[in-house]
């Protein structure tokens, strides 16, 4: 962690995250434009932009606006939600690996979605509601199980890993039980995949972000205070335990929204805040830059997955999994004593 | 002392004094009885229930009936695989916990299984290696690499070690799943490298891995005394005539042989090595000399019971043994963290 800077320097420091955020936004949108032009019908970025503006070559509107745009928007929004929730989780657990997918909230949402698909009908609405309910229940269970006169970041992580392993088993069990037709739909909830995602999923992500995003930004001051430790935060008038619960609830909601919209895409919530921090070089949670980095990562991974796969469509989760693994190996090697922050 | 939420927790009150010799002997004897019972149940229970009389008939004097075939060709190899792999994983977990002095050490949780799995998947999917003897060596290489990494991280606190292991697991299994999806031709062959299961058709593979598993087990048991010595700290261990460096190296070798061999036969099965040492420690105390033999006997009981549970829970389908152990192990992890055995 960087030491606190003097007043004269703090102005300069806060400008860098802003510029970085704008650069990340631009990069994410550029990747989106390239992805919109990629596929059986190839279009140049200029043609894509003209189509988006209402002009463009004949027939491009159908391909770009109706077929590709929902999926690309879905990727950008899911990445935004994952990056933001990852930043909150890492800050609360004070560990660069304490991201929601590692700690198991993603598994809770997946199990909820699977249960909804198997118990009710196959469709976006029950699956989404199931994912949200599953994520919320898992978070509540982990929080209560980790509670002992307060919640310690480390205990939260360990309980989360345990619950996550049990939930993974439940997911596999449900998958074995599901009949063949439903199993095909269920499979997309086990590996993060954007294939077949469309307007409804993008709408879910947008709606969730519109509700939870502002809610999170209202709590950002508290998150920064909590990073200084519970005692310091309490001394500054922040009720530590209540603030942590509210933040945890909001971040879990964001994870569940991302899972509902795009399935459990691994490692984005882990890597996005870390990468964003390295670029901004700022102390503190950096929630917005982490979110924008998440958007960029998912969009880029989706483009890579579409380019790589020949006959069998490669889920975006496999690309982020492999790239995330490489990043993790680097993180383990680069930091002395393994995982020092 | 850890201060949590303004409250000070008491120093650990767990009884670390060695349990009585009588309790240990009784636990070991009870374990052997349970093992025999679990093996018998594993031969009898399944999609098709076979009465004990017919099981005995198949074992003692087979006459080629249908149930004889099921017992001898499918259930007997499956049970033997369960006994061998369970014992190997339990021993490996006990050695890892003693060596790293970390209560969360387990070949599955810390990614040693996943290392072996990913290496085998690479050998089959990318390098085109065929045949068990070919990829067995890849399993050892992958397990060894992961075991060295874990031992280097050994002194780390439980939270960091568990997080690192979970993340390594996620990355390696993501890689295995990727290979699986890209190479649809070997989808079925690849599937077992992401979920561990006992499979009666792999009796031949067990025979191939058995010498290595046996060597690993003998090595682990022979190291018990030295492991107890280095648990006192390196200086004290040297004054007792132990060689800390050599003991660590040999322990990693034993973990590699046991975990690599077990994973090559059954795929990655997690949490057996975590659960069993914690379950038997009340009867053995913390010392490796009593802990290791007890784990050797009780771990197969757990794996066989998990396998049997997987057979009966969703008839006619089966849930893999690795999924059952992951479910139980995950819950136990929560209990350990709540019960102050693991202190974040």
Image (cartoon, coloured by chain):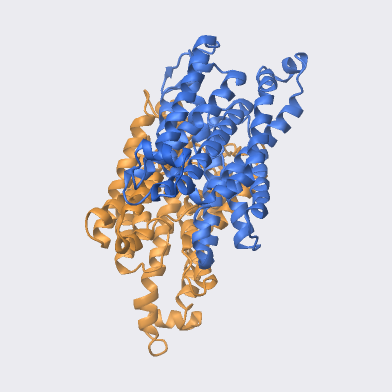
Residue B93 x, y percent position in the rendering: 56, 32
Q: Quadrant of the N terminus of chain A?
A: top right
One can see residue A217 in this view:
no
Residue B187 x, y percent position in the rendering: 50, 62
Residue at the image position 46 percent from the left and 82 percent from the top: A40
Q: Is residue A328 left or right of residue A215?
A: right
Residue B4 x, y percent position in the rendering: 44, 23
- Residue with the most extreme bottom position: A58
Q: Quadrant of the C terminus of chain A?
A: top right
* Colour-to-chain, blue: B
Quarter occupied by residue B157: top right
* Colour-to-chain, orange: A
Quarter occupied by residue B232: top right
Q: Is residue B147 left or right of residue B336?
A: right
Residue B77 x, y percent position in the rendering: 51, 44
Compared with residue A277, is residue A149 higher up or lower down, i.e. above or below?
Answer: above
Quarter occupied by residue A122: bottom left
Residue at the image position 37 percent from the left and 36 percent from the top: B53
């Amino acid at each position: 962690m960087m030491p606190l800077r003097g007043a004269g320097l703090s102005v300069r420091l806060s400008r860098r995250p802003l510029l970085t955020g704008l650069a990340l936004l631009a990069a994410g949108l550029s990747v989106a434009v390239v992805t919109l032009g990629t596929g059986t019908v190839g279009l140049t970025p200029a043609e894509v932009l003209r189509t988006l503006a209402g002009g463009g070559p004949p027939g491009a509107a159908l391909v770009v606006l109706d077929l590709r745009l929902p999926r690309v928007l879905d990727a950008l929004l899911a990445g935004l939600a994952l990056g933001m929730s990852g930043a909150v989780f890492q800050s609360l657990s004070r560990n660069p690996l304490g991201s929601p997918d590692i700690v198991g909230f993603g598994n809770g949402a997946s199990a909820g979605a699977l249960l909804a698909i198997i118990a009710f009908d196959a469709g976006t609405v029950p699956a989404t509601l199931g994912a949200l309910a599953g994520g919320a229940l898992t978070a509540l269970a982990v929080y209560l199980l980790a509670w002992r006169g307060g919640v310690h970041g480390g205990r939260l992580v360990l309980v989360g890993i345990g619950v996550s392993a049990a939930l993974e088993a439940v997911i596999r069990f449900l998958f074995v039980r599901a009949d063949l037709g439903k199993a095909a739909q269920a499979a997309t909830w086990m590996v993060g995949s954007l294939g077949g995602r469309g307007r409804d999923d993008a709408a879910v992500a947008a709606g969730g972000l519109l509700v939870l995003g502002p809610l999170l930004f209202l709590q950002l001051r508290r998150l920064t205070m909590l990073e200084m430790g519970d005692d310091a935060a309490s001394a500054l008038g922040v009720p530590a335990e209540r603030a942590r619960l509210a933040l945890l609830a909001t971040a879990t909601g964001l994870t569940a929204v991302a899972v509902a919209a795009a399935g459990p895409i691994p490692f984005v919530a882990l890597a996005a805040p870390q990468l964003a921090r390295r670029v901004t070089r700022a102390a503190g949670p950096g929630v917005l830059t982490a979110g924008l980095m998440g958007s960029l990562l998912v969009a880029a991974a989706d483009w890579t997955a579409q380019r790589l796969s020949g006959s069998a469509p490669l889920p975006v989760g496999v690309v982020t999994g492999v790239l995330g693994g490489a990043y993790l190996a680097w993180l383990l090697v680069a930091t002395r004593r393994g995982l020092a922050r | 002392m850890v201060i949590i939420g303004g409250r000070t927790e008491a120093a650990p009150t767990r009884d670390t004094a060695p349990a009585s010799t009588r309790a240990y002997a009784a636990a070991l004897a009870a374990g052997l009885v349970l093992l025999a019972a679990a093996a018998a149940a594993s031969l009898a229970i399944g999609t098709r229930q076979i009465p004990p009389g017919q099981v005995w008939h198949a074992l003692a004097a087979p006459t080629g009936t249908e149930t004889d075939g099921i017992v001898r060709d499918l259930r007997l190899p499956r049970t033997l695989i369960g006994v061998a792999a369970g014992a190997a994983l339990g021993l490996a977990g006990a050695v890892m916990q003693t060596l790293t002095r970390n209560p969360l050490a387990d070949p599955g949780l810390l990614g040693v299984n996943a290392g072996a799995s990913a290496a085998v998947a690479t050998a089959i999917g990318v390098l085109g290696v065929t045949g068990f003897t070919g990829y067995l060596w890849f399993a050892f290489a992958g397990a060894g690499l992961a075991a060295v990494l874990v031992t280097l991280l050994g002194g780390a606190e439980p939270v960091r070690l568990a997080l690192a292991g979970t993340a390594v697991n996620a990355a390696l299994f993501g890689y295995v799943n990727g290979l699986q999806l890209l190479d649809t031709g070997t989808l079925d062959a690849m599937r077992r490298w992401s979920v561990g299961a006992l499979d009666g058709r792999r009796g031949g593979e067990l025979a191939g891995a058995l010498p290595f598993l046996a060597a690993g087990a003998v090595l682990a048991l022979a190291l018990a005394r030295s492991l107890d010595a280095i648990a006192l700290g390196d200086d004290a261990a040297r004054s007792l005539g132990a060689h800390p460096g050599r003991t660590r190296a040999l322990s990693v070798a034993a973990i590699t042989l046991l975990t690599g061999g077990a994973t090559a036969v059954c795929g990655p099965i997690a949490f057996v090595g975590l659960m069993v040492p914690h379950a038997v420690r009340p009867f053995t105390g913390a010392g490796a000399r009593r802990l290791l033999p007890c784990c050797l006997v009780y771990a197969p009981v757990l794996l066989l019971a998990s396998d049997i549970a997987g057979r009966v829970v969703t008839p006619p389908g089966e849930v893999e043994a690795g999924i059952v152990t992951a479910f139980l192990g995950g819950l136990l992890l929560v209990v350990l963290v709540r019960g102050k055995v693991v202190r974040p």
